[in-house]
Image (spheres, rainbow, N blue to C red):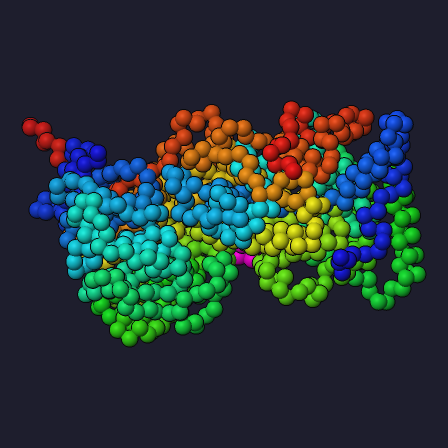
């Protein structure tokens, strides 16, 4: 059983999941480094800290919800879903965790109680796959988005429908076509984020369109153009990319969107990991951030740190990639990177001192068959939850006496 | 029912030479029951010659987990559900709702187990029947079938390949059979360019220029390999034939309902074009779709890709059934391999020849049938697996070609038409 506090390296005393506490040094993203990792038998898609920083939850292909109590190292599970978990979000104002799956079902959990049953289930919330969840800053509404292009708001109290943003798409996913200036999304929704002022939120779709909605009125305020994150070349037979993640800065003055630009095919889907930073006031794209190392998949997670640094993490085919740290106002290249395997999400601990990401782990069975000779050793790939510490390593080696 | 694409009465007629050959062969059997035997043999020969094939190739490898052999409850299964089909107890992926309704017409082989994990060698190897290093360039399936069945005298190219991109005469597919057995490729399903003769050229002028071309060819042939000239002449003759059948490419004649049923995407358009050409009597049609090699983002891609074959494939099967053509037309839907059980760092699936699925329907094929099975986690074939050699024997058997007895002759060298160490997949045959 994984333990959160078992040090990977005896000198690495701060590399645990506990809130940083008195030992913590000053936030220094330029010295960010990989800390503790926790293995999981199956691949994970999402990993998030609870708003009070006491718990960490993760879920993915094994359908169950894994919850770690950070301080006590205890782990428990929640029954989860009947298919892969696609999204996971905590209620910032309560002890609720919401999870969604690839069949369009959403469940609410009292996550601190081991093996507890769902508080409520919303069945078929979003036609086909529910891909994104968010909770309003007052904790009253759960937002969900998925394949039918509508953002639905649900009461966090009982899961009853409260509001809809946009009109449900009826054409199948593969037959959809982008049209500029539509009142709702033309494609499936991949990402959601609530603005820090609590009055509005953004939804991002498969075509790279970001829509800014007013929560109270349900009105569409404007579109932001993140079309760079979408590719459909003439010889493609599918849409590639889409807005995969969002992050607002603390003041709500900047919105970062992550994904993949310049895809070269709809098969391998290789492209250029890309981040677009928007000025929230004008809605204009200010900069396109890049990686300086080879990586071919989308940026799947973004988080602003308290000093204005933007952290981003994504995927790479069959090789390591990086968690990148940018000063978006300074230059498009990261000022620091931490090498690691592909990540499908990224979250920041409430203490602001560490990030967490579910990383891909290859178990020697990757790549093309034929594998008949290695039948007995053929096993699934897995994940590890990785902590990225946002401060310098502390050298605890004893000082030699003169 | 006479179809509007059908041309004159010469369609599907046995040639005089074939008839005499058949009768001579029958006479050798002996006097006893000669009349009856002759009738049976002629009937069998006529039936064989009427056989047609549509070979649908999803280049790159469709995921069996997201199509014919879903395992949602296993460690390797994807997030999609299974749905019941028209055959009780048989379930396939929810991404194939149209095909599910027509499962009673299909055989799905879930126990393909092949050797080659690479596209570069796998595509040619599979479409040539994996001839096992015979030292010669074996023909692709389309060339083989048109050679073995004998082209019908209907004035149409026997082997047409509908594909994305550019077209042309692809003589390389003929292998050692010689260039004339190559494929006429219709890029984007469109006829060869210049198919329409300008009005300014009269019939007489056209005949005169063709005569000049023939004379030039004869001279050109004198000091060159026959195959080169054959390829040129064959492509020209095919273009000439198609010039007389312009209506086959006139999409304004297609019912709007059919266009909607097949879909306006490339596979939809190309399979509808294929149906038109099958109705006209083209003997072998290959339809290729590229970009199924979902190493990255397999599940989002499958959600978009699999319905693109499901809808027009089901429309085609339904149309062939409605037109009573399924008894004569063999339908093959396959890739060069399946996709890995394991899911990689880009949430993709890689190449997996060890255990994968394909679908067959129509002439000589058992209906409402699942052949073979994979292990609970979908990674391996449980029981007997089938290689490409088995598949080629099965295809030839379904077409009435005795693949265990008939051989090619290449410069006097006898060569098996399918791997002589394999047998047909009997469970797939009617």
Give x and y (percent) for residue B216: 89, 47
Image position of A112 (left or right of A168): left
Q: Nearer the viewer, residue B62 or A192?
A: B62
Vertical comparison of B116 with A332: above or below: above
Residue nearest the observer in this picture, B344 or B337: B337
- For image coordinates 29% across by 66% down, the residue present is A161
Q: Is residue B37 left or right of residue B106?
A: right
Q: Is residue A367 visible?
A: no
Is residue A144 one of those drawn in magenta?
no
Does residue B272 appear to the left or right of A53 in the view shown? right
Q: Which residue range is magenta in the image?
A: A233-237
Check the picture and name the quadrant holding the N terminus of chain A: top left
Query: Where does residue A100 sit, x and y in percent of width and height?
Result: 31, 54
Residue A38 in the image: state x and y as whole percent.
24, 38
The mark tally for this picture is: 0
Residue at 33%, 55% in the rendered image: A105
x and y percentages locating residue A20 in the rendered image: 13, 47
| Quadrant including the C terminus of chain A | top left
User: Is residue A235 found inside the magenta-colored segment of the image?
Assistant: yes
| Most foreground residue, A33 or B381 | B381
In percent of the image, x 31 and y 45: which residue is there?
Answer: A63
């Amino acid at each position: 059983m994984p333990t959160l506090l078992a040090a990977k390296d005896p000198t690495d005393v701060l590399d645990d999941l506990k809130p940083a506490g008195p030992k913590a040094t000053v936030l220094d993203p330029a010295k960010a480094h990989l800390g503790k990792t926790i293995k999981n038998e199956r691949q994970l898609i999402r990993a998030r800290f609870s708003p009070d920083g006491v718990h960490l939850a993760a879920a993915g292909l094994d359908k169950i919800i894994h919850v770690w109590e950070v301080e006590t190292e205890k782990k428990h599970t929640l029954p989860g879903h009947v298919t892969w978990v696609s999204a996971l979000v905590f209620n910032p104002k309560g002890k609720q965790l919401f999870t969604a799956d690839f069949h369009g079902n959403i469940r609410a959990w009292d996550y601190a109680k081991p093996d507890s049953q769902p508080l409520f289930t919303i069945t078929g919330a979003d036609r086909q796959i529910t891909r994104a969840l968010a909770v309003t800053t007052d904790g009253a509404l759960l937002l969900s988005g998925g394949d039918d292009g509508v953002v639905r708001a649900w009461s966090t109290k009982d899961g009853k429908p409260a509001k809809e943003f946009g009109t449900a798409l009826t054409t199948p996913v593969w037959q959809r076509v982008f049209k500029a200036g539509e009142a709702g999304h033309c494609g499936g929704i991949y990402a959601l984020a609530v603005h820090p002022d609590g009055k509005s939120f953004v939804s991002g779709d498969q075509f790279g369109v970001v829509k800014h909605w007013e929560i109270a009125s349900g009105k569409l305020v404007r579109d932001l153009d993140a079309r760079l994150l979408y590719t459909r070349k003439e010889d493609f037979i599918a849409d590639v990319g889409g807005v995969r993640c969002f992050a607002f800065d603390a003041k709500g003055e900047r919105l970062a969107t992550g994904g993949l630009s310049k895809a070269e095919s709809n098969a391998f889907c290789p492209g250029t990991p890309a981040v677009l930073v928007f000025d929230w006031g004008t809605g204009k794209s200010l900069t396109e951030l890049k990686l300086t190392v080879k990586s071919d998949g989308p940026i799947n997670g973004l988080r602003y740190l308290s000093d204005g640094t933007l952290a981003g993490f994504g995927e790479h085919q069959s090789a390591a990639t990086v968690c990148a740290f940018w000063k978006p106002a300074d230059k498009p290249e990261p000022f620091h990177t931490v090498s690691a395997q592909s990540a499908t999400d990224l979250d920041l601990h409430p203490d602001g001192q560490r990030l967490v990401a579910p990383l891909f782990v290859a178990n020697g069975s990757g790549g093309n068959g034929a594998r008949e000779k290695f039948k007995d050793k053929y096993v699934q790939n897995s994940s590890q939850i990785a902590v990225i510490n946002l401060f310098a390593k502390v050298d605890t080696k004893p000082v030699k006496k003169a | 029912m006479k179809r509007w694409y059908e041309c004159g009465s010469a369609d599907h007629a046995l040639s005089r030479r074939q008839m005499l050959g058949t009768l001579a062969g029958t006479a050798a059997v002996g006097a006893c029951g000669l009349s009856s035997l002759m009738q049976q043999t002629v009937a069998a020969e006529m039936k064989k010659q009427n056989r047609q094939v549509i070979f649908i190739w999803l280049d790159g490898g469709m995921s069996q987990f997201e199509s014919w052999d879903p395992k949602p409850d296993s460690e390797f299964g994807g997030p999609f559900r299974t749905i019941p089909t028209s055959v009780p107890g048989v379930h396939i992926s929810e991404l194939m709702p149209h095909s599910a309704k027509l499962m009673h017409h299909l055989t799905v082989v879930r126990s393909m187990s092949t050797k080659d994990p690479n596209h570069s060698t796998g595509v040619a190897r599979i479409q040539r029947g994996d001839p096992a290093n015979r030292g010669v360039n074996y023909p692709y399936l389309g060339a083989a079938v048109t050679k073995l069945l004998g082209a019908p005298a209907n004035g149409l190219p026997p082997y047409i390949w509908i594909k994305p991109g550019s077209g042309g005469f692809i003589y390389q597919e003929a292998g050692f059979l010689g260039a004339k057995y190559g494929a006429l490729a219709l890029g984007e399903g469109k006829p060869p360019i210049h198919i329409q003769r300008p009005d300014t050229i009269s019939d007489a002028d056209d005949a005169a220029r063709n005569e000049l071309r023939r004379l030039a060819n004869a001279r050109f042939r004198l000091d060159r390999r026959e195959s080169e000239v054959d390829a040129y002449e064959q492509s020209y003759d095919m273009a000439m034939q198609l010039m007389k059948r312009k209506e086959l490419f006139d999409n304004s004649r297609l019912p709007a309902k059919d266009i909607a049923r097949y879909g306006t995407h490339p596979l939809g358009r190309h399979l509808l074009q294929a149906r038109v050409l099958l109705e006209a009597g083209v003997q072998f049609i290959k339809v290729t779709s590229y970009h199924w090699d979902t190493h990255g983002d397999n599940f989002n891609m499958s959600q978009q890709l699999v319905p693109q074959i499901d809808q027009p494939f089901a429309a085609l099967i339904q149309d062939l059934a409605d037109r009573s053509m399924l008894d004569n037309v063999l339908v093959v839907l396959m890739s060069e391999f399946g996709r890995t059980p394991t899911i990689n760092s880009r949430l993709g699936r890689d190449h997996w020849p060890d255990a994968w699925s394909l679908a067959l329907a129509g002439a000589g094929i058992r209906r409402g049938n699942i052949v073979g099975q994979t292990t609970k986690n979908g990674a391996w074939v449980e029981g007997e697996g089938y290689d490409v050699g088995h598949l080629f024997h099965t295809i030839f058997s379904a077409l009435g070609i005795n693949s265990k007895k008939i051989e090619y002759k290449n410069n006097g060298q006898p060569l098996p038409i399918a791997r002589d160490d394999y047998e047909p997949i009997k469970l797939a045959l009617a």
